[in-house]
Amino acid sequence: MRPEQFLEVAVVQASAPLFDAVSGMEKACRLIVEAGASGARLVVLPEAFVGGYPRGLSFGAVVGSRTREGRNLFARYHEGALEVPGPGIERLGAAARRAKAFVAVGVVEREAGHPGTLYCALLYFGPDGTLLGRHRKLKPTASERLVWGEGDASGLTVLDTPFGRVGGLICWENYMPLARAALQRMGVTVHLAPTADARPAWQATMVHVAVEGRAFVLGCNQVTTKGDYPADLLAHPEIQALPDVLCRGGSVIVSPLGDVVAGPVWDEERILRARLDLREVVRARLDFDAAGHYARPDVFRFEVPGLPEPISCRPASEEGAPAGGTDPRTRSRSTPASAASSPAAAPPRRRRTPGRGSRRRPPASRRPGSP
């Protein structure tokens, strides 16, 4: 069946309490329902919205040494992460169901039954409230590697929806050409880009990703201040050294030809809304299609071992089988690498997302305002 022509989207720019998954989740649920009430059928929330982006903290780690205070702070950050699966997932799913929308929300994930490694993840919910998929950040940036593990190819989630294929990359994953190529090969027409990067230069990245992929790009960021940290941590020397404004936002929606449809929004909480004409994707691919007539598979070979097939989210009347599921780890197996190297997008099919498996590295320095 031909995809629907128009899509109402909502990009949520807001702040959320750090080290407090419950409060972050409650605010996320309220914003999801609010966005759905305006008619949005796709709602996006920023990177690490639930659990928090711990900007400015070293967790007591330098090369060759860790402090007891830093370990205690990490334990507190771990406690404030979102357990997956868990009650918080049910509440986020209920909000998506009330909104009657597909929802993508950035969380700091604590894997149920495995205390230790945290993940920066993007969770995908269907309009019936089911958890459809989970993407874990492939490469945390700089000091993020101390507190977040790495995802793998099986988490490159793409949803095959009635309005086209939706997928996303988190923050500086969008600088990874092959990660973008993987989503392009799976036919993404709406590219989600939750981030913690508020530099003006990030806007150029969003335009490039849109023009390269000939897809709509939904860039989504938080707007945060030191006041979003717990009150008892404001006296921490590293937090005291931070500016009052930690992240200015910059959420934006860009068309397949690089035109800014909405935003960017700075220094305020706002739900950015737009009505997308999905025919623009086909129009834009007349002269450039990175995974089609511009791919040159006779010259370049591209394979992603373990790359999953898109998850079918179409009504059973379209696919001949129920769509969606309740846990991203219950899907069927992923496609072989040979299928991933084909220029054409693979047909939709359910798949399995990753279990554990990550590594962490020592921290590196980072400029304020960068992820």
Image: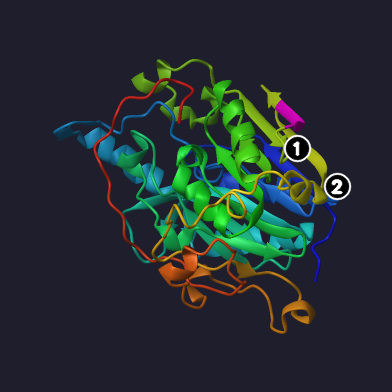
| Side (left or right) of 248 relative to 134 | right
User: Mark 2–mark 1 contact, CB under 8 Å?
Assistant: yes
The residue that mark 1 highlights is 271
Q: Amino acid at mark 1?
A: Ile
* Spatial CA span between label 2 and label 1: 10 Å
Q: Residue 118 in magenta?
A: no
Indicate the quadrant containing the C terminus: top left, top right, bottom left or bottom right. top left
- Residue visible at 63% across and 47% down? 191
Up/down of 212 relative to 200, above or below: below
From which residue to which does the magenta span run? 259-264
| Side (left or right) of 64 relative to 154 | left
What percent of the width, then of the height, locates residue 301? 42, 56
| Side (left or right) of 109 relative to 237 | right
Magenta stretch, main secondary structure, is strand
Of the image marks 2 and 1, the number of the one nearer the N terminus: 2
* Along the viewing direction, whichever of 93 and 360 lies nearer the viewer: 360
